[in-house]
Image: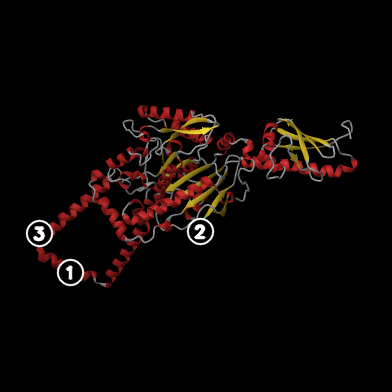
Amino acid sequence: MSEEDEPYGASQLLDVTVDTAWQILTSVAGARRWFEDDSHPGVRVGSTVAIRGAKPAEIDAVFRGSSIRLSFPEGRRARLKWCDFGERCKIVVTDYGGDGREANALADGWSALLSAALFVINETKANRHSRQAIVVIHGIGSQRPLSTVKRFTDALVDRSERWSKPDQLSTSYELRRYQLRRTRTRPRTDLFELYWADKVPGTKLKHISSWLRSIARRSPRDVGTSLRPIAYLIWIVAVTAAIGVAFLVWALGVDGVDRLWHAASAIAKIGWISAITSVVSAAISGFLISSLGDAARYLDAAPDNIAVRQSIRQSGVSLLRRLHADRRYDRVVVVGHSLGSVIAYDIIRQYWSEVYRSHGAPLAVDQTCLKQHTELFAAAATNGQNLDSYRRAQRELWQEYRRLGHPWLITDIITVGSPLTHAETLLARSPDDFRGLKEELELPTCPPQIREDSDDAEKKSLTLNEQYLVDGQIRTIRMLTHACPFALTRWTNIFVPTKAIVFGDPIGGPIAHLFGNGIKDVRVEMSPWWRRYTPMAHTSYWHRPPGAAGTIAISCLIDALDIESGRWLDKHVSEMMPWEMSVGNRRTAELR
């Protein structure tokens, strides 16, 4: 059949531009998906294309960005042409070797190939939808698995907007993940719970009393400013009690005190007094062990507690490691409530120390955002920190780091009702010791600390030079040091203010004055009033009153999460991932 005879024609409309369709379908990965051949060498002269109902055709010409010419063993020739169709593309098939008797066979063969092209294009577009993970870490108390993350998720969205799914990343069969519906502005979002309550076994009163004694024995000047009034109160009570006992002995004499003691013991033996005393003692002991015991075991680095601390941190770092290795997620947010905020801080600094020197091997190194961040950091040291500018620089630096091949996905840490406000007492032996730990870079800050007087390169500068070999050339890339996780990870701290020590949230409070003025401290109020003005505020940050659309605390939490991150995150993913690399890059089934 000559080209003057009527050829067979077919077409398929694709919802991408011509350039994008060409990049996807002619790349090696795209061709293998399109032609359903895992070993296909790609679209190039000499390679073959299998057409249903016919012998394989050979590619005898490739006109880049435009068309492919095919020849069949029996002399048939065909052409696949990429045609501009506005913001979309149309692939047009022209087969010059068919006749009327072969029309059905031709239609089946080319229809199958065009349908495969449509499937690969749509799958690749789905791969480029961003996805984010939120890790929620519960606080003290006998917490049950999933209780925290379920309440947290219900505070964010209506139940119709979320589903409970299997959790393949956590190591406990007691856990599941909650998935939020994708919207125009919200990426597919998975919420995980880092459950650690089962890792604090065998807590006894001796663990709590040992920890409390170690704090109570400190002089008030060795206690952080947030707890110093309580320290003075304890010393006043102790001195008053000692003076009272001494006065009692002086007034009654030794014999009088002995008779008073025996009289009190006799009264205590009365049944109902003994029963009440036992019940009260058991209640206090139970509360201390189930609640305060968690804090004592985690915050006190006594030999009996090291295994507990290690187990909790190890489970947290392992979860972060698996989230990063899973390849489904483009962004991770870590949220810690109460003691969980201390755990969040610890696992972020520990995981950063594992990966901070990781990077790709780009042919050209563009670190404009790192330079701007360093200049902003230097200006802040003398003129004060512009918080909004610094947080924008952090986000831009994170995106630049990802484009350079760094694996770090954590964009934000959110601490809620955090005892880090008492870090000078809980994480150190005194305020001076706390400052020393920061200067030694054991406790990372936001922004990071540097010591220009140090001989240690990692203390003197925010960055170190790393060299790598690519394309036969040695390249140099500047990497942030082990003390800089919060150079590119934003930190938001949400708290209810405390009044007269006991009103409000006595556990949480501001932390920017301790860990750096790059932290955004957010004061919130609770509803109703009895939660706002009692210690119950500490457990009400994502409590939604019946019939209420939300609270100020929940609104601030949603804002800090930046849960509607779809627009900027999709743009970031498209910038760092060429279209041809998106083909089959990750599994995209909505059920995952």
SS type, badge 2: loop
Which residue occupies 51% across, 53% down?
170
Q: Can residue 247 be seen from the camera position used here?
A: yes
Q: Taking 527 as reference, is 62 above or below it?
A: above
Which residue occupies 62% across, 38% down?
581
Q: Real-space Cα distance between discs 1 and 2?
A: 54 Å
Residue 51: x %, y % from top left: 78, 43
Mark 3 sits on what residue? 250
The crowd level at tag 3 (other Cα within 10 Å; few <14, some 14-19, many 20+) is: few
Horizontal side, residue 100 vs residue 470: left or right: right
Q: Residue 174 carries which label?
A: 2
Which mark's residue is nearer the viewer, 3 or 2? 2
Which amino acid type is marked by label 3?
Trp
Q: Taking 360 as reference, is 136 above or below it?
A: below
SS type, badge 1: helix
Residue 387: x %, y % from top left: 42, 32
Out of 443 and 110, give the one closest to the viewer.
Answer: 110
- Disc on the earlier residue, 3 or 2: 2
Mark 1 sits on what residue? 263
Which amino acid type is marked by label 2?
Glu
